[in-house]
Each structure stands twice: as C-alpha cells, then as structure tokens.
C-alpha cells in the first residue's frame, strides 16, 4: 500500500472524525508517526559503536576458552574456564571471547558482567550446553543460565549453538503435569541493562524456559538468529523484550512452544523485519497488566513475516484489572498458513488455573494498524477484537486483509472495539464501526470541502479508490 495513499486516507479521517468528533488529533499524529517508523537496513548509526570482527581482524586479542582450561567434551564442567576467559576478555580492549567450533562446552548458570573494555566481540562457533538436571541447578540463579549485563558496544556472532538441554525442565513444568509445582525455569540467554549490542547468526535451542530475553536495554539489533524448541515445550518463548527501547529483530526464524516474540512492559520503538514464526503461539505484545499491574508498550512495527501452524498470528494480550496502555502498533506484509487466531486482541487474557474475573480497569489499546495480511486461518473467527467493556480498543485500522478458511466461512468478532477499514478487508470488519453507521459520511462533501488538508491534485486521483474501498468494506 502506497504511503501517500495512507496519509490521504488519514487526511480524510481527520475530516470525518472532526465531523464525528471522536478521534483525537493526537491519535492521528500517532498513526502518522507510526507510518514513518520503519526498519532501517543494516548499519544504523545508533549501532555504529559496535565492533566488527571481520573488518578489523588485525589488532584483536583472541581469548579462547580452550586456553583457560575448557575441555569441550560435553561432560566436563567448563564453567570456571568460561568465567576466567570472560574476566580477561572483558578487561582487555579489542578482545574476542572465542568459543571455538566443533565442541560442546558444558557451562552452569553464569553471570557475565560488564562493563567491559572497548570493542568486545563474543564469537560463539561451538556449542554451549546447560547441565540438564533441574535438581542440581544453582539455587542462587533459578531463572538464569547465560546472563550478560551492563554491556556497551558489544557484538555477539558466530554459527554456534546455545542449547538449554530443557527436556527435564519441561517435564517438571506445571503445564505438563498439574501435580508439579508452578516454578519459573532459567532463560537460556539474557542481555540485560546493556546498550549498543548486536547479535548475529547464533542458534538458541531447547531452552529451559524463555530462549532469549532482552531486558532493560537500549539499541539492540538481532539478526539471522535461529530459535528452536519442540512445539509442546512449555513457556519457551523465542525472543522476549522487556523494559527495552530501540530494538530491531530481523531475519530471524523462530519455532518454539510459546510466543515466537513477546514484547512486554516498558518497551518502545521495537522493529521486526522478516520474521519466520512457527510452530508457536505467534508474535505477541503482552501479556500485560497481570495482578492489576501497570504496563506500557509504545511503537512496535512488524514488517514482513510468515507464520505457519501457529496458535495465534498477530496478538495483543492483556489481563483484566491492569493499567497502562499499548499505543502505536503496525503489523504489515504478513502471510499466514493454518494459523488458529490470525489477528487477535484479547483484553481478557487469563493464563491461570483459576478463571479471571472481569474488572473495570484494563490496559488501554489504541492506534493499531494491520495492513496487507493474508493467508489461511484454522478458526472461523479470523479476526478477534475482544476488548474490555469499560476500556474499549480505539483506532484499529485495517487495510488489505484477506484471511480464508479452507472449508468454511470466516468472520470478525468485536467486543467494544472501534476502528475502520479501507481497501479489501476480508472478513469484513463492520463490527469495528457498528456503533457508528455514519462512517459513510466520510464521503464526497468532506473531500471537496477540506481537500486542502490532503492536497488538491492527489485527491481527485485517489477519491475514487477510497470511495470504492469504503463501499467494499461496508463501513
Ligand atoms: C556446576 O554445577 C554443578 C551442579 O550441577 C556443581 O557441582 C559444580 O560445582 C558447578 N560448577 C561450578 C564451576 O560452579
Ligand atoms: C505427574 O506427576 C505425578 C507426581 O510426580 C506422577 O505420579 C504422575 O505419573 C505424573 N503424570 C504424568 C502424566 O506424567
Ligand atoms: C513497568 O515498567 C515501569 C517503568 O519501569 C514500572 O514502574 C512498572 O512497575 C512496571 N510494571 C510491571 C508490571 O513490571
Ligand atoms: C485487583 O483489583 C481488584 C479490584 O480492586 C481486586 O478485587 C483484586 O483482588 C486485585 N488483584 C490483585 C492480584 O491484587
Ligand atoms: C504483502 O505481503 C506479502 C507477504 O509478506 C508480500 O509478499 C507482498 O509483497 C506484500 N505486498 C505489498 C504490496 O507490499
Ligand atoms: C467479561 O466480559 C466479556 C465482554 O463483555 C464477556 O464476554 C465475558 O463473558 C466476561 N467474562 C466473565 C468471566 O464474566
């Protein structure tokens, strides 16, 4: 969809809503701003501080874990060797912390703390494996395996594998067997309280719980990362972003037993490009607002994704009773194959053995755009906008949506959700505006009267298409 066209439509909406008086100017501003929020291809200035291994091989100090006593037979405990190698690498400028190829290094839960000397490269070519027995896990680090914190300007790269050996953890999960206690398990790889970090080309697999968490960080770019775990492994989110800003995920292939990507509280400016997801629970914002907590997520863009055999596609999930908001999200150019809930906003999320009561407060959801989303759905409700009765979802914008069910009809479900569609929207999203049948008033008089808002020449060019679109979607 042409950007100018979108802005034109926004212009028309400004006009229409001035008439209807129910769309605030700052909403329009957010939609417009979102429109210009794109994923820049490589070499972003914000990450220019990140060292490159290939371009500056000279002058590098190689810190090979083997030189610090690592055995790499998958049986010997290499934790101490990794810690010692880290202490050298982190304090030496331009060093390369090297995990060489072809071996399996058994490493316990470890904190790799920064800040480090300038231009550190963490080159992982071999396999790092976790001890597989939950009973022997370090009780002081119950939720961590490989935890990197306070890094600034660091590059992680290589063809290596980070393997959480999670099968015993999964079996001991309360989601697998209700008689097990509900306990959190370690995250395989964590980047915490860091900035200007780049992660390229690694494989993270079979994590005990979440695979890769980016927390309390700024300017993190993840590319060509593969995340993989069985479809039935519990809570094994692929990439989880919390308390972070300016994060880019691109060219990642993620298939796990939970969300491929989950973006939660206090995160903003998150961009995802070319993401392959499946199996898994989809690309999610949330969950947010559990136990009456306050959460915000601002500005998230997903551009180009393929989701296959996932339980959800593009999802926003919040608990009843929460506070805060999700504002400014764009999902575009997404293809789906056999996805159960391709497009879903769920403000009644309840991942708890007890049922959750409806409450009056909820995390507010607004300025959510879906554009060029097509493919096949497993459920007949291809689009679900299940919003709180007291805190409705606002300004949901749909365009060029085409979701089909192999044998059967598809429909859109709305509860307390407001917005509009233009272009082809299938299944029709009439229910987003059914509270206001006057949307046809967007029509001709408004266009001519206020055409200066949008620009005289282009209006005539586009007005026909717009009118068609509006008729087609029966708004
Ligand atoms: C790693 O954990 C095991 C228990 O699983 C423990 O016996 C061992 O001492 C730990 N290694 C280090 C270096 O702390
Ligand atoms: C669930 O756990 C209980 C207690 O550990 C065990 O007796 C039971 O066999 C387990 N059930 C399954 C289906 O694994
Ligand atoms: C969300 O982040 C904000 C800002 O850091 C914090 O004040 C709040 O407690 C967080 N909420 C939750 C649920 O963690
Ligand atoms: C959340 O707030 C509701 C309404 O005030 C209250 O009934 C409920 O106990 C609270 N839940 C938690 C976990 O604090
Ligand atoms: C729509 O999305 C699909 C799937 O990602 C993509 O292949 C196609 O190029 C997009 N179309 C336009 C007009 O951008
Ligand atoms: C909560 O409200 C929604 C929307 O009105 C309704 O569909 C749902 O049944 C309610 N849930 C409970 C547990 O009352």
Image (cartoon, rainbow, N blue to C red):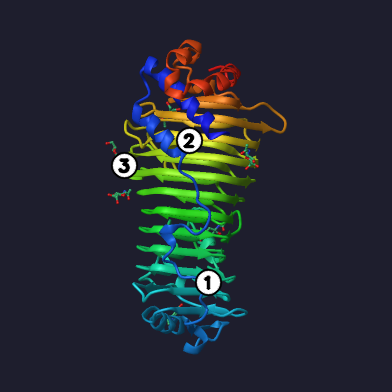
Q: Distance of mark 2 from mark 1, alpha carbons? A: 37 Å
Determine whether the beta carbon of the residue marked 3 sits less than 8 angstroms from the nearest atom of ligand 4: yes
Is the Cβ of the residue at disc 1 closer than 8 Å to that at disc 3? Answer: no
Mark sitting earlier along the chain (2/1): 1
Q: Circle 2: is it few (<14), some (14-19), or many (20+) Cα within 10 Å?
A: many
Q: x%, y% of residue 242?
A: 39, 53
Q: Which of marks 1 and 3 is in front?
A: 3
Question: Which residue matches tag 3?
Answer: 292
Horizontal placement of 321 versus 302: left or right?
left
Q: Quadrant of ligand 4?
A: top left
Is 164 located above or below residue 437 in the figure? Answer: below
Between 3 and 228, the one nearer to me in the picture: 3
Q: Distance of mark 2 from mark 3, alpha carbons? A: 18 Å
Q: Distance of mark 1 from mark 3, alpha carbons? A: 36 Å
The dot on residue 345 is 2
Question: Which residue matches tag 1?
Answer: 132
Q: What element carries label 3?
A: helix
The picture quadrant where one finds residue 450 is top left
Q: x%, y% of residue 263?
A: 44, 49
Is 86 located above or below residue 166 in the figure? Answer: below
Residue at the limit of the structure toward the top, as seen here: 445
């Amino acid at each position: 969809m042409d950007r100018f066209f979108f802005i034109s439509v926004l212009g028309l909406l400004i006009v229409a809503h001035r008439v209807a008086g129910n769309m605030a100017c700052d909403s329009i501003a957010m939609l417009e701003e979102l429109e210009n929020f794109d994923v820049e291809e490589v070499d972003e200035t914000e990450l220019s501080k990140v060292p490159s291994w290939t371009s500056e091989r000279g002058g590098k100090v190689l810190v090979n874990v083997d030189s610090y006593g690592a055995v790499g037979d998958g049986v010997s405990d290499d934790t101490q060797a990794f810690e010692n190698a880290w202490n050298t690498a982190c304090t030496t400028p331009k060093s390369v912390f090297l995990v060489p190829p072809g071996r399996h290094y058994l490493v316990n839960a470890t904190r790799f703390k920064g800040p480090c000397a300038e231009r550190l490269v963490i080159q992982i070519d071999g396999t790092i494996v976790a001890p597989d027995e939950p009973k022997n896990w370090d009780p002081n680090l119950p939720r961590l395996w490989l935890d990197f914190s306070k890094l600034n300007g660091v590059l992680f790269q290589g063809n290596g594998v980070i393997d959480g050996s999670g099968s015993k953890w999964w079996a001991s999960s309360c989601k697998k067997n209700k008689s097990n206690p509900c306990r959190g398990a370690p995250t395989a790889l964590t980047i915490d309280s860091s900035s200007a970090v780049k992660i390229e080309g690694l494989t993270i697999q079979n994590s005990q719980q979440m695979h890769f968490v980016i927390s309390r960080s700024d300017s993190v770019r993840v590319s060509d990362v593969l995340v993989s775990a069985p479809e039935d492994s519990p809570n094994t989110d692929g990439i989880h972003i919390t308390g972070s800003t300016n994060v880019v995920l691109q060219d990642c292939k993620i298939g796990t037993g939970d969300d491929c990507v989950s973006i939660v509280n206090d995160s903003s400016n998150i961009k995802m490009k070319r993401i392959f997801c499946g199996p898994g629970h989809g690309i999610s914002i949330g969950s947010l607002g559990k136990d009456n907590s306050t959460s915000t997520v601002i500005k998230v863009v997903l551009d180009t994704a393929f989701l296959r055999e996932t339980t959800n596609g593009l999802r926003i999930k919040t608990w009843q009773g929460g506070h805060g908001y999700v504002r400014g999200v764009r999902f575009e150019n997404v293809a789906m194959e056999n996805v159960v809930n391709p497009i879903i906003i769920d403000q009644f999320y309840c991942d708890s053995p007890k049922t959750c009561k409806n409450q009056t407060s909820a995390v507010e959801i607004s300025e959510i755009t879906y554009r060029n989303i097509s493919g096949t759905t497993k459920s007949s409700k291809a689009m679900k906008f299940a919003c709180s009765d007291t805190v409705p979802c606002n300004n949901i914008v749909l365009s060029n949506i085409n979701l089909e069910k192999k044998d059967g009809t598809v429909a859109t479900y709305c509860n307390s959700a407001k917005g509009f569609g233009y272009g082809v929207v299938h299944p029709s999203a009439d229910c987003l505006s059914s509270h206001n049948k006057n949307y046809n008033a967007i029509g001709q008089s408004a266009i001519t009267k206020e055409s200066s808002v949008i620009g005289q020449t282009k209006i005539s060019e586009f007005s026909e298409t717009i009118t068609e679109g509006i008729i087609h979607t029966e708004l």
